[in-house]
Image: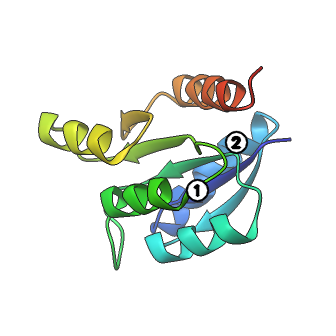
Amino acid sequence: MPLILVVEDDVEMNELQRELLSLHGMESLPAYSGSQALELCEQHPIDAVLLDIMLPEMDGFETCRLFRQRQTERRLPVIMLTALDSDDCRRRGAACGADAYFVKPFDPDEVVRTLQTLIAETKGE
């Protein structure tokens, strides 16, 4: 069962995303800041990350960049889920290493399909 890290500082939105993942047979861990997310990735066998951009301490762009710097064995899929809908933000997401970028409110089925595809690709399925 895939383990997804949900990085979202809004508690209610974090819970909603985790419920969505559970409905699709995925386990999840909550993180409410970029630094907490980085710590959890070191402590658990995370299969993918759903990452908000507007976070306390460090934003999602910096968090994603640090995920990429710290990876040694395999590329961890990162999907950005954000309210920021601009070409500049999309470019910044791609530049820091995000695999996909969805604007809130997002289509839950599309996010789940993208997540499943990215996880399968990293596992060589």
Nearer the observer, 33 or 94 = 94
**At label 2, which amino acid type do we have?**
Leu
52 lies left or right of 121? left
- Mark 2 crowdedness (10 Å alpha carbons): few <14, some 14-19, many ≥20: many
How much space separates mark 1 and mark 2, taking CA atoms? 10 Å
Q: How many marks?
A: 2
| Residue 98 location (% of width, % of height) | 40, 41
Q: Which mark is residue 6?
A: 1
- Identify the residue shown where x is 15% and y is 38%: 86
- Identify the residue shown where x is 41% and y is 44%: 80
- Mark 1 crowdedness (10 Å alpha carbons): few <14, some 14-19, many ≥20: many
Circle 1/circle 2 CB separation < 8 Å: yes
**SS under mark 1:** strand
Whether residue 33 is visible: no
18 lies left or right of 100? right
As drawn, 122 above or below 113: below
Q: Which residue is mark 2?
A: 21
**SS under mark 2:** helix
